[in-house]
Image (cartoon, helix red, strand yellow):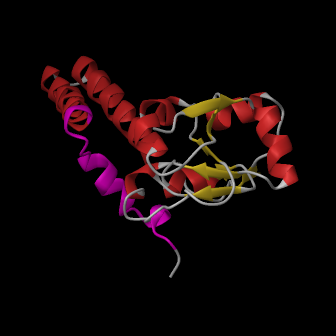
Amino acid sequence: MTTLTPIDPAALSRRLKAGDIRLIDIREADEFAREHVADAISIPLSNLEAAHLNLRAGMPVAFTCRTGMRTGANCDRLAAYVSEPAYVLEGGLDGWKKAGLAVTENRKAPLEIMRQVQIAAGSLVVVGAMLAIAVNPAFAWLSAIIGAGLVFAGASGWCGLAKLLSLAPWNRRAA
């Protein structure tokens, strides 16, 4: 079975410039749209099987995500699509930037959905706590409901707030 070997950002950068490796970014499309390595190909982990990825022939491949956690947690799954050699970018996109390497940024793209969820949920919890202190203790239920929703999202992988935020006008893609 193929194993993914760690590759440091500087070495990957040299290989990308030489054109002898492909970089696949497994983050979701909204994350990729906001910021990515210029030569990366976007194939979200959630769509990996649907992408009919077949990288067995041709040049080596490296996988990346934001911090390296997703690629690390899914090494076996990713390795099933490639033959030797295959790599994982150490530190992900954050490691790439920390090494002083350039990224393609689109600050006009909406924040990633999960960041929007964190901002919205955190804001609702704070508002619920402040209203419970200043107006009526029953407002503590707002914080409790949001907390329960986050626990459910973490346990089930389904987040209603993310679904709702994806319908917001700023998250709709241009036709």
Q: Is residue 149 left or right of residue 1?
A: left
Q: Quadrant of the N terminus?
A: top left
Measuring 46% from the left and 62% from the top, which residue is drawn there? 171
- x, y (%) of residue 102? 82, 44
- x, y (%) of residue 100? 84, 33
Q: Nearer the viewer, residue 57 or 53?
A: 57
Q: Quadrant of residue 147?
A: top left
Measuring 48% from the left and 42% from the top, which residue is drawn there? 79
Measuring 38% from the left and 42% from the top, which residue is drawn there? 117
- x, y (%) of residue 2? 51, 39
Q: Nearer the viewer, residue 110 or 42?
A: 42
In the displayed structure, 152 sits above or below 135; it is: below
Q: Which residues are magenta?
A: 154-173
Residue 162 on the magenta span: yes
Q: Is residue 16 left or right of residue 87?
A: right
Q: Main secondary structure of the magenta part?
A: helix
Q: Is residue 58 left or right of residue 79?
A: right
In the displayed structure, 5 sits above or below 34; it is: above
Q: Nearer the viewer, residue 147 or 80?
A: 80
In the displayed structure, 82 sits above or below 57; it is: above
- x, y (%) of residue 18? 87, 52
Q: Nearer the viewer, residue 51 or 31?
A: 51
